[in-house]
Image (cartoon, helix red, strand yellow):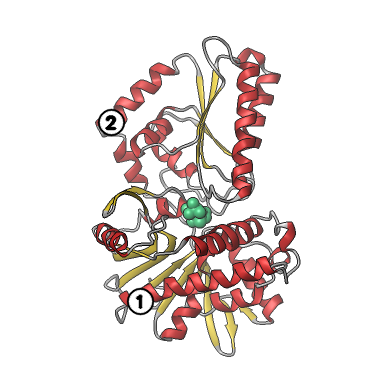
Amino acid sequence: FRRLGLRGMKQRLLVVANRLPVSANRRGEDQWSLEISAGGLVSALLGVKDVDAKWIGWAGVNVPDEVGQQALTNALAEKRCIPVFLDEEIVHQYYNGYCNNILWPLFHYLGLPQEDRLATTRNFESQFDAYKRANQMFADVVYQHYQEGDVIWCHDYHLMFLPRCLKEHDINMKVGWFLHTPFPSSEIYRTLPSRSELLRSVLCADLVGFHTYDYARHFVSACTRILGLEGTPEGVEDQGKLTRVAAFPIGIDSDRFKRALDIDAAKRHVNELKQRFAGRKVMLGVDRLDMIKGIPQKILAFEKFLEENPEWIDKVVLLQIAVPTRTDVPEYQKLTSQVHEIVGRINGRFGTLSAVPIHHLDRSLDFHALCALYAVTDVALVTSLRDGMNLVSYEYVACQGSKKGVLILSEHNRLVLVPFL
Ligand code: F6P
């Protein structure tokens, strides 16, 4: 707030992210159930307190009819959420296509998909066009709810075009944009056909934030090398206009996790887990089922451990919670089959009549069950190949209390030491 030039916390905050913190499921023509969305962005922003905030985003569901849209809008209003309705075609081109098949792998150093390396493929162009249209749809909803003085906080690679749409509408809007993934080296970023347009759009914001100093530095050097703009210690300057660029390492509301363990439901889970795994060491993985999380690599490392240390067979178990994500994208479908195949093979190889070495769940757990798992397990394995700022490590530490389990992080994870450590 201070860096956006705001004095107090009196301003209203409009958070704009692709996904709302709750996802909707239809139960009838005008009946909806809401559940907390998975992912780091939601986990981090649930910790934003003492601010008059509303959240604008997609509820993760196609609602073609007006009755359904109105009912969902009403249900979300109670949660201070405002939906952006995206139809199937735009979700396919913008979310599955441009966001998750192009920007996501590129920003995590996995490169562009083979067919999109040629900038002019029609596929690429139509997806980029849908991306811009989708960003404009988010902007239209912001305009409907904006009041003078509001701060608009845009999130993530889905909405790089949004700062430009907002400033074109009203140059006085206070706009921040924050990226929840790595921003890659300019050498990688410059392979993106739409590189200049996206950078120029992000630079329309007043303040641009990243998890780490490295990501901020990569962004500034992309602006220097690709747009020929001047990088200053404060940010990027273009014809006298300064866009501030800085690192704001994200965290979690650790008290929310600690408090959850005082609830009876969590205590029951803790006792059940202790009984079920008595006499065995328990290793835990909690990830969205995403290629950047290194799930196959983690499981294969576990296999190697059992292979080299057979005395541990039946004495250690790996619990892998793999929350399904982006299930319409073929790469994610392939990853799911690959993980299932590896788990099946290892369980067949090292399982006994009394136990299997890997428990793999393709779903999320309710919050109290998750906190209980964090509390009782002996080891947490966070093995991302690249990650913006993995929050599972924070969640694990917050729930461990005096247990002193071991947190194993791959070297490509970012962790900022926090006071409770
Ligand atoms: O880590 C990047 C990110 O966009 C997060 O901000 C979000 O929590 C996560 O990916 C979830 O992705 P999706 O909404 O595509 O399931």
Residue 396 in percent (x, y) is at 45, 38
Q: Which residue sits at x=43%, y=86%?
A: 171
380 displayed left or right of 403: right
Residue 320 in percent (x, y) is at 52, 32
417 displayed left or right of 73: right
383 displayed left or right of 52: right
Query: Tag 1: Cα neighbours inside 10 Å, few (<14), some, or many (≥20)?
Result: few
Under circle 1, the secondary element is: loop
- The quarter of the rendered structure image containing the C terminus is top left
Earlier along the polypeptide chain: callout 1 or callout 2?
1
| Circle 1: residue type | Leu
Determine which residue is flagged by label 1. Answer: 6
Q: Does residue 411 appear anywhere in the picture?
A: yes
**Residue 377 versus residue 326 in the image, above or below:** above
- Residue extending farthest to the bottom is 239
Q: Which residue sits at x=34%, y=58%?
A: 48
- Between marks 1 and 2, how big is the CA–CA gap? 42 Å
> 353 and 387: which one is in front?
353
Residue 265 circle label:
2
| Circle 2: residue type | Ala
**Residue 373 versus residue 323 in the image, above or below:** above
